[in-house]
């Protein structure tokens, strides 16, 4: 599965952007979806979704494919692997069948999940500012 940065060549996030792509209920999209902007999915997507922002899968939304994004909120159904750079929120109506990789995870009571979950540690760098002298 391609990671988001392989699509975009960067790890920049458009999470704070006011721009949204919206797939309305009753719409079926066949094929991969790649976006620099946030996405709201209320319809059906049959293919992989890659986004450099947030993906919201509404209660009527369905994805049959892999999801790669910075943050995700799932209220609907997803069948595929999820690779979330930061936070995944599974609402009580969420139905996920597939493996998850995320840094942070919130699961509401009633959400359904079948698969494995790997919690990634956030990328941090440690800087040492104190000089240490060793005595013989």
Image: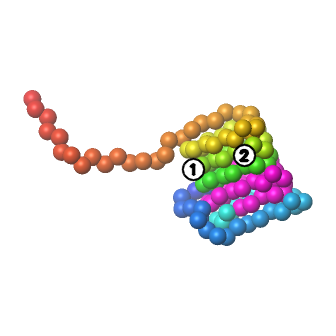
Residue 117 image point, x, y percent:
64, 35
For the point 77% across and 65% down, the residue is: 22
Q: Which residues are magenta?
A: 39-67
Placement of 115 over or under 69, stated as above or below = above
Of 31 and 132, nearer the camera is 132
Q: Residue furthest front?
A: 109
For the point 81% across and 58% down, the residue is: 42
Determine if the magenta segment contains residue 43.
yes
Determine if the magenta segment contains residue 57.
yes
Q: Quadrant of residue 44?
A: bottom right
Label ID, residue 91: 2
From the viewer's perspective, is 66 left or right of 64? left
Observer able to see residue 31? no
Element at label 2:
loop
For the point 73% across and 66% down, the residue is: 21
Q: Residues within 10 Å of mark 1 (few under 14, many from 20)?
A: some
Label ID, residue 86: 1
Query: Separation of disc 1 and disc 2 at Cα?
Result: 16 Å
Q: Residue furthest right?
A: 26
Placement of 51 over or under 20, stated as above or below = above
Mark 1 in CB contact with mark 2 (< 8 angstroms): no
Residue 37 image point, x, y percent:
66, 66
Label ID, residue 22: none
Residue 96 image point, x, y percent:
75, 41
Which label sits in the foreground, 1 or 2?
A: 2
From the viewer's perspective, is 62 left or right of 85? right
Q: Quadrant of residue 10?
A: bottom right
Q: Quadrant of residue 9?
A: bottom right
From the viewer's perspective, is 40 left or right of 51? right
Observer able to see residue 43? yes
Element at label 1:
loop
Residue 132 image point, x, y percent:
17, 40
């Amino acid at each position: 599965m391609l990671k988001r940065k392989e699509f975009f060549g960067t790890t920049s996030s458009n999470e704070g952007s006011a721009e949204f792509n919206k797939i309305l209920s009753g719409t079926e999209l066949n094929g991969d979806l790649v976006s620099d902007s946030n996405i709201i999915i209320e319809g059906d997507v049959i293919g992989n979704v890659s986004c450099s922002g947030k993906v919201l899968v509404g209660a009527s939304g369905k994805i049959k494919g892999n999801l790669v994004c910075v943050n995700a909120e799932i209220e609907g159904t997803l069948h595929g692997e999820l690779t979330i750079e930061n936070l995944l929120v599974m609402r009580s109506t969420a139905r996920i069948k597939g493996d998850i990789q995320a840094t942070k995870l919130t699961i509401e009571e009633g959400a359904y999940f079948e698969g494995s979950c790997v919690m990634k540690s956030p990328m941090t760098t440690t800087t040492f500012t104190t000089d240490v002298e060793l005595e013989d």
